[in-house]
Amino acid sequence: HRQAKNIMATQAIATGVPMLTAGDEFGRTQQGNNNAYCQDSQISWVHWDKREEWGDLLELTRTLLHLRRENSSWRPGEYRHGAEVLAADGTPTGRKDLAWFNGIDVEMNEGDWADENRRCLGMYVSDADSAFLTWFHSGTESLEVALPGQPWAQAWSVVAHTGEPDEFGGDEVTGSLHVPPRTVVVLRARL
């Protein structure tokens, strides 16, 4: 289930239109068949009885699509280049519309991008009104990631994750965050 939730989270967060097929939100796979439209069999049927078994994926999908709809920082009008975000009055905020974090220091550098052993990275998206930091961790071991402070955010709160319900608390977080293995976690910035 966790890997299915990771794929759904990545799809929902990505720039552009999320390309979902009926049943993706509750584990429908078509057994890997990408041409199931021409088959009238169990491969192409939507199995509504699986909704309870996959309720966690359905709730995650709802949460992420709601966040996407309600927050313009997830729906940019043009391609992001790491441009400085301006406040409504035109003053610089010190934040970028897109930044990538390595979990140790702050922003990723060339060495981080070239590290073939890297299993975690943070994607920061922002506009004048909101900011989010998403950690994508594909490693098999838990790790502690450093959370960026000002000007990126005063504090963070977990708004969605692909882990078990008790793996993340609901309180604000500053400093660092414990990320379980094979997890995507989305944090909202308190600006």
Image (cartoon, rainbow, N blue to C red):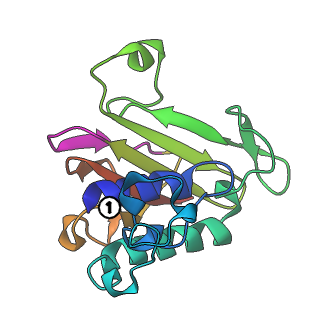
Name the residue nearer the viewer: 180 or 57.
Answer: 57
Magenta span main SS: loop
Can residue 117 be seen by looking at this rendering?
yes
Q: State the residue at coordinates (35%, 62%).
A: 161
Q: State the residue at coordinates (22%, 51%).
A: 178
Q: Is residue 71 left or right of residue 144?
A: right
Residue 72 part of the magenta-drawn span: no
Magenta residues?
138-149
Can residue 155 be seen by looking at this rendering?
no
Name the residue nearer the viewer: 163 or 44.
Answer: 44
Label 1 neighbourhood size at 10 Å, few (<14), some (14-19), many (20+)? many
Q: Of the residues shown, which amino acid type is indicated by label 1?
A: Thr
Q: State the residue at coordinates (49%, 72%).
A: 40
Image location of residue 42, percent across then percent down: 38, 73
| Residue annotated with mark 1 | 162
The quarter of the image holding the N terminus is: bottom left
Name the residue nearer the viewer: 165 or 92.
Answer: 165
Q: Secondary structure at mark 1?
A: loop
Q: State the residue at coordinates (64%, 50%).
A: 126
Q: Is residue 188 left or right of residue 177?
A: right
